[in-house]
Image (cartoon, rainbow, N blue to C red):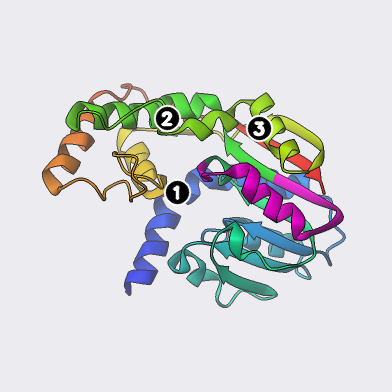
């Protein structure tokens, strides 16, 4: 197995189980004719792209993600253009629909990224995106940073995930509107899954885009092996004895 295959396999194992219910929410929310042009922003290994093609085989999908490794699984997906990059790499389109699953809260400047997505959309195009809710932020994210701070003094600050305020529905609506989208609506969604400490740890170290120093590295990046083990031990030790229910998210819909 190549490094590229291994990265995608780990993503599908550790991240996809938590992202899949929210991707399904997006697909259910869309009302399509089946011949639209779709932009999947932050496509990962293609949860939404593949789900859309199962329901609407004729859709033309552009899958955009910074990771070539994750996108490699879409190389043989029909009617799919794969582009490696962030919002700055969005082609001119115009797209009929923009979808994004659990990505916006990781954007350093979500207003700027959403503005670029709108600029690539035709007038009246639809946006459907999910973010993790505040309850999810408070549990595993907060526990991760608390564990890191116990091992690496000064590792955590309230600003590490300041843009996670998108988990607040009013904040999310304001950000999307500030990017020029209109008719913005936000509603809660539920992805029912109970997770234990080890599963939560694997999810976090696969999904977090910055390290414990907040310096823009991979979650493991700033830590040597001993520190990683100590953060892991601290994280597992403070996890609730009963698995924590992952159930809080938000779906935002809007038009260009």
* Camera sees residue 200: yes
**For marks 1 and 3 on the same chain, the one whose residue lies earlier in the sequence:** 1
Dot 2: element: loop
The x and y percentages for residue 16 are 49, 51
Q: Residue at x 66, y 72 (%)?
A: 80
- In the depicted structure, whether residue 83 falls above or below residue 48: below
Query: What is the distance, in whole Å, between disc 3 and disc 2 at their CAs?
Result: 17 Å
1 vs 3, front mark = 3
Q: Residue at x 35, y 66 (%)?
A: 6
Choose top left, top right, bottom left or bottom right for residue 177: top right
3 vs 2, front mark = 2
> Label for residue 233?
none
The magenta span reads: 106-128
Choose top left, top right, bottom left or bottom right for residue 87: bottom right
2 vs 1, front mark = 2
- In the depicted structure, whether residue 86 falls above or below residue 228: below
For the N terminus, the image quarter is bottom left
Dot 1: element: loop
> Label for residue 159?
2
Residue closer to the observer: 117 or 22: 117
The residue indicated by pointer 1 is 15
- In the depicted structure, whether residue 232 falls above or below residue 101: above
> Label for residue 172?
3
| Left or right: 46 as drawn, with respect to 15 | right
């Amino acid at each position: 197995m190549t490094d590229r295959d291994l990265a995608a396999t780990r993503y599908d194992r550790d991240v996809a189980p938590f992202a899949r219910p929210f991707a399904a929410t997006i697909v259910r929310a869309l009302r399509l004719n089946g011949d639209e042009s779709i932009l999947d922003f932050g496509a990962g290994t293609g949860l939404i792209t593949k789900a859309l093609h199962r329901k609407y085989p004729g859709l033309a999908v552009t899958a955009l993600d910074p990771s070539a490794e994750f996108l490699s699984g879409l190389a043989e997906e029909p009617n799919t253009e794969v582009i490696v990059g962030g919002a700055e790499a969005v082609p001119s389109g115009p797209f009929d629909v923009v979808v994004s699953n659990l990505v916006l809260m990781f954007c350093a400047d979500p207003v700027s990224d959403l503005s670029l997505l709108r600029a690539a959309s035709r007038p009246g195009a639809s946006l459907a995106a999910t973010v993790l809710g505040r309850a999810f932020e408070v549990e595993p994210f907060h526990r991760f940073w608390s564990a890191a701070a116990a091992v690496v003094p000064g590792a955590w600050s309230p600003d590490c995930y300041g843009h996670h305020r998108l988990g607040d529905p009013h904040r999310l609506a304001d950000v999307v509107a500030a990017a020029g989208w209109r008719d913005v609506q936000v509603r809660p969604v539920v992805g029912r899954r109970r997770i234990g400490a080890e599963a939560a740890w694997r999810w976090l170290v696969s999904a977090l885009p910055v390290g414990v120093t907040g310096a823009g590295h991979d979650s493991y990046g700033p830590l040597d092996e001993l520190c990683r083990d100590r953060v892991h031990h601290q994280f597992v030790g403070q996890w609730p004895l009963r698995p924590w229910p992952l159930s809080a998210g938000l779906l935002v819909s809007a038009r260009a």
